[in-house]
Amino acid sequence: MRIEQLEYIQAVTRLGSLRRVAEELHLSQPALSETVRNLERELGVNILNRTRSGARISDEGRELLPYIAGVLEAVDQLRRAADDQHHSNRVLRVGTVNAATVGLVIPTIREFRETHPATRVEVVDAREAEIHRSLREGSLDIGLVNYLRGDDPPPDFDTTELLCGQPVVCLRADSPLATRPTIEVSDLVREPLIEMRSGYVMHRYLHRLLDGRTPLFSCSTDGAEMGKLMVAEGLGVTVLPDFSVVGDPLERAGTITWRPLASRQVDVLLVAQRRRSGPATRPARELHHLFVKRAVEFGERAA
């Protein structure tokens, strides 16, 4: 049984004769008639009543019409789904709060590109609330966000823990604070402080850490990458998860470094999130798998 055989039967029902169907589909009438006869032989049913004046749907054929329509509708849905997946395969969008971009995101995308050279990956820097909104709207495939241990992620997302780290002070390698094994909160307030803008987990953590104390000077920025560049340029120090600093090109070059905080620590998590509702495309699933795989390798290197 072939799909076009069912389509021909549906067309005969609509147009009323094999001749009209043959004209519309640009087929020869004998070829069309033989195709329909093959279907009838396979089903063991005379779908058409043939007379000298033409062919019409038989009573038996009319009983089969709802099933024929159902099969053709299912095929149409399959084609639409495949077409949607084809287009979605071409672009994957990853939202990230820009922590661990260098150490995790870039190697993951590099590996993904080797097996999906025709798929473009867009990395979008945004705050957590913006990433969650875009995931719900379907304009992002994967979101990478930070949590503090004990935070509850939204229940409408599948959340996979990728990295677990500790907050550290990121500072220039030639800073006097770099000679110390740990940094006290009192040291932070005597330094120009670069903080993440409101909406980032590290903004919330830093204000909890300072507990109302005011630093010598402060400025704010979006994302860890700009914060590290500002540290490298001597504008101050910042507090980031250790996995955002370790292995960074600036750290490998010896421009920036990091020191643990002396105060009690809390785990900072980097997680990958996806919508629970709606199926993910195969490339999106494979990219998510690579993030998990690379996170394991990243953690082993950091240890």
Image (cartoon, grey):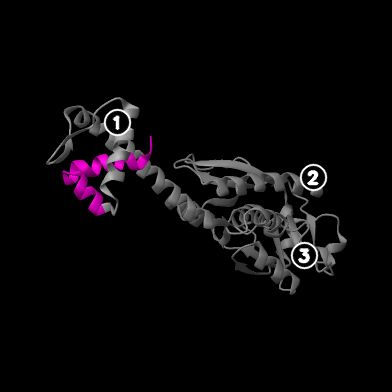
Instruction: Please tell me whether mark 2 sits on a helix, a strand or a loop.
Output: helix
Instruction: Please tell me whether mark 3 sits on a helix, a strand or a loop.
Output: helix
Instruction: State if disc 2 and disc 3 touch (CB < 8 Å).
Output: no
Mark 1 or mark 2: name the one nearer the start of the chain.
1
Location of mark 2 (residue): 300
Location of mark 1 (residue): 40
Q: CA distance from mark 1 to mark 3?
A: 70 Å
Read off the magenta span: 1-24
Q: Main secondary structure of the magenta part?
A: helix
Asked whether 13 falls inside the magenta stretch, the response is: yes
Q: CA distance from mark 1 to mark 2?
A: 65 Å
Badge 2 crowding class, 10 Å Cα cut-off, few under 14, some 14 to 19, many 20 or more, is few
Badge 1 crowding class, 10 Å Cα cut-off, few under 14, some 14 to 19, many 20 or more, is some
Front residue of this view, candidates 234 and 55: 55
Q: Which mark is residue 145?
A: none
Front residue of this view, candidates 286 and 16: 16
Q: Amino acid at mark 1?
A: Glu
Instruction: Please tell me whether mark 1 sits on a helix, a strand or a loop.
Output: helix
Q: Amino acid at mark 3?
A: Pro
Q: CA distance from mark 3 to mark 2?
A: 19 Å
Q: Which mark is residue 249?
A: 3
